[in-house]
Amino acid sequence: MDQLWVILLRGINVGGRNIVKMALLRDALNADGFKDVATYIQSGNIVLRAPSDAAAITDRIDEILQRDFGVSARILTLPTGTVTDALEHMPYAPQAPKHVMVYFLFGAATSDTDQMTALASATEEFTITDRFVYLHAPDGIGRSKLAEKMEKLLGTSATARNLATVAKLVEMVSAKEG
């Protein structure tokens, strides 16, 4: 039986490289047998239905990206509850959700918290969990030295989404589950 998944693509449509049009990707995923495919903005956020095997889904999407778009990207295939948990357990209540980043981890973080604290500005806060890292940068993510070096300091690959995007993904999941 198919279940709903959230797919996060890392490294597409960034800086004019690895260009993948979401409408074309939706078409390719549907043609390959995925169901109920929806995307959000151009940064590689997908909600779809597929059999319950994350590794197989990841492999199929990787094959489609390479075959149809000539693109290689890191792919994180998540049960919908993971994204919902990221939103529900967010430790900050900012006025501007684009100033909070949620880093979805590909593996266990081996974080250098001392170095992270040293790089954080006086207004920045971060929280590390076993699946996510939250960064609240009220002066702007683009100005954050910590955001710039976050993945290196985590010791694992990650893909980041701002809180507004995470909330939209949860909304999309809720609409498809309801």
Image (tube, rainbow, N blue to C red):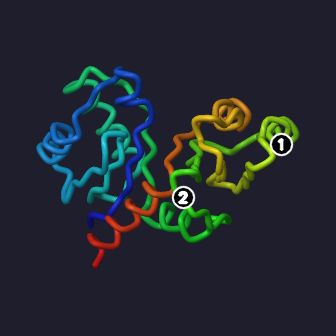
Q: Is residue 163 above or below residue 108?
A: below
Front residue of 97/7: it is: 97
Q: Which residue is pictured at 27% across the width and 50% down the height?
A: 39
For mark 1, give the secondary structure. Answer: helix
Q: Is residue 52 above or below residue 120?
A: below
Residue lying at 24% horizontally and 54% vertically, measured from the top left:
38
The residue shown at (61%, 63%) is 94
Mark earlier in primary sequence (2, 1): 2
- Nearer the observer, 149 or 131: 149
- Quadrant (top left, top right, bottom left, bottom right) of the N terminus: bottom left
Give residue 123's position: percent from left, percent from top. Answer: 75, 50
Residue 117: image tag: 1
Q: Give coordinates of residue 150: x percent, y percent.
A: 67, 36
**Residue for badge 2:** 96
**Above or below for 165 versus 93:** above
Q: Amino acid at mark 2?
A: Ala
Q: Nearer the viewer, residue 19 or 64?
A: 19
Are the residues at dot 2 and dot 1 in contact (C-beta closer than 8 Å)? Answer: no
C-alpha span from label 2 to label 1: 22 Å
Disc 1 residue type (three-letter):
Thr
User: What residue sits 38% from the left and 49% below the top?
Assistant: 7
Residue 136, horizontal then vertical, whole percent: 66, 52
The residue at the far right in this view is: 114
